[in-house]
Image (cartoon, rainbow, N blue to C red):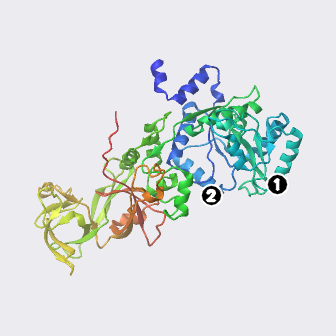
Amino acid sequence: MEEEKKSLNFIEQIIEEDIANGLSKDKLRFRFPPEPNGYLHIGHTKAICINFGLGEKYGAPVNLRFDDTNPEKEEQEFVDSIKTDIDWLGFTYDKELYASDYFEQLYSWAVQMIKDDKAYVDEQPSEEITAQRKNPFEEGIDSPFRNRPAAESLALFEKMKNGEFEEGTMSLRAKIDMKSPNMNMRDPVMYRILKRPHHRTGEKWKIYPMYDWAHGESDYIEQISHSLCSLEFENHRPLYDWYLDQVYEGNQVRNKQREFARMNVSYMITSKRKLQRLVAENAVTGWDDARMPTISGMRRLGFTAKAIRNFIDQVGVAKRENLIDIQLLEHFVREDLNKISTRVMAVINPVKLLIENYPEGQEELLDTENNPEDENAGTRTVPFSRELYIEREDFQEEANKKFFRLKLGGEVRLKSAYIIKAERVEKDAEGNITTIFASYDPKSKSGSGTEESLRKVKGTLHWVSAQHALPVEVRLYDRLFTTPQPDAEKETDFIEFINPESLKIVQGFAEPSLQYAEIGQPYQFQRIGYFTKDRDSNSEKFVFNRTVTLKDSFKIDA
């Protein structure tokens, strides 16, 4: 039993202890509460997987609640993208809810707090309120409005609600403890005036609740048993509990906030503000740019939901923050793609290969495996002809003994086809090779069973029939930043670390089957990497994004 307990992460241990102490399992309820002010990123996947994973483990419902308390930054576009991301990750939420659903209840509770002398209207600007709070090592100074009569605060609060004051002129503050070493407890603001339209409530409200006030009370309304959040909210927990004390009724579930470490991945940024800046300054093409660490960006790049979930499982739930190597994420992407990707032939830096002794006008359809990792994947045919494209890097006029690809006088096997020998080359005026002339052994066809077909040569090259080739635009993506922690340097703008080589676009050729590829469908371009069809494709333009290269040197400790 003790060994089983140790195998649980610390959050699961907390839940198990709560159950052991009398919390009924049917009272377990979790939630994922994003603010719809941007697209979800790799850091959010941890919170998503933790909350929904607990729901799956305990058979408990999980709410998707949008903490939409700031109409200045929130949009329906972000709501829609968040729902799409969660669906894509494979999770199902019990209810779709919004903090704005509870604005009337939150206002009513705030009014009661004023009556109970637990809140007051402050007429000071935010700069003065901040200055009076001082610092953790110095006692704060009471607001001159802290002890104003409840009736006066009630009247002012109603006028705030009715839009009779300008923004920044008044706020409602909780009356807690200006001497507390926890700065969050020094009379925090509960409401501010914002005369901005809300994406759901329109022009109805002129005041909006602050996050700390709305968040915990929303958890309480929904009867969330365990409010799980990242470590930066740990010092907010006393305020979370204090607010809960003001509304808690003894026959209800007493929701509990607990914190886990955020997930930071090398070469990625997870600050919404900084991601917004990348978009605003056109450093990327949008929130779903394939170089972005957003879920939509990773999906567009070709990452799979299973790979991301496996990555989160490997990272685990920790109490301390650390930097996760991006190679671990890429390892799980390769691992999944290797199992599910159709193998195809594409050439991204082409040079023409002409087999002189192959009959002119002849064509063949050669069988090739769709995926050797999947016995049910079957085979397909690819066209073969006299003129082909191969990778320019796969040929050298002269090469050392360790070069096992094609060279003058040397032999290689063409994948699923014949053994060829390079005879001579043709060059342009600048000395660039334009055509490689070769001969082939007609009896060496792969799978034909002849003695010649079993002959071993050291190199095997992929190719595309020139006559049947599908022109493709290939986007070779690399990491967006040149340093593992682009925002770690306080004196250097993270923008300065953008990798100018993060995207290279080349024109290549692919086997004709790719004209039927679906957007997002994974492929392995043999000997090159994993790719997926991009949404910029149309009937006349075929665009493929490189998800990851084939090489994986990352080792997972046992």
Q: Nearer the viewer, residue 245 or 239?
A: 239
Task: Residue 372 in the image: state x and y as whole percent.
Answer: 31, 49
Decide: few, some or many residues near mark 1? Use Cα within 10 Å; few <14, some 14-19, many ≥20: some
The numbered mark, 1 or 2, whose residue comes first in the sequence reads: 2
Task: Residue 494 in the image: state x and y as whole percent.
Answer: 47, 55
Task: Residue 366 in the image: state x and y as whole percent.
Answer: 27, 62
Image vertical order of residue 228 relative to residue 291, above or below = above
Task: Residue 3 in the image: state x and y as whole percent.
Answer: 45, 20
What is the three-letter code of the residue carrying label 1? Phe
Image vertical order of residue 379 relative to residue 514, above or below = above
What is the three-letter code of the residue carrying label 2? Glu
Disc 1 to disc 2, C-alpha distance: 31 Å
Asked whether the residues under the numbered discs 1 and 2 touch, taking CB atoms below 8 Å apart as contact, a structural biologist would say: no
- For the point 39% across and 55% down, the residue is 482
Label 2 belongs to which residue? 77
Q: Quadrant of residue 131?
A: top right
Q: Quadrant of residue 249?
A: top right
Image vertical order of residue 89 relative to residue 2, above or below = below
- For the point 46% across and 35% down, the residue is 316
Let me know if residue 98 appears in the view.
Answer: no
Q: In which quadrant will I find the C terminus?
A: top left
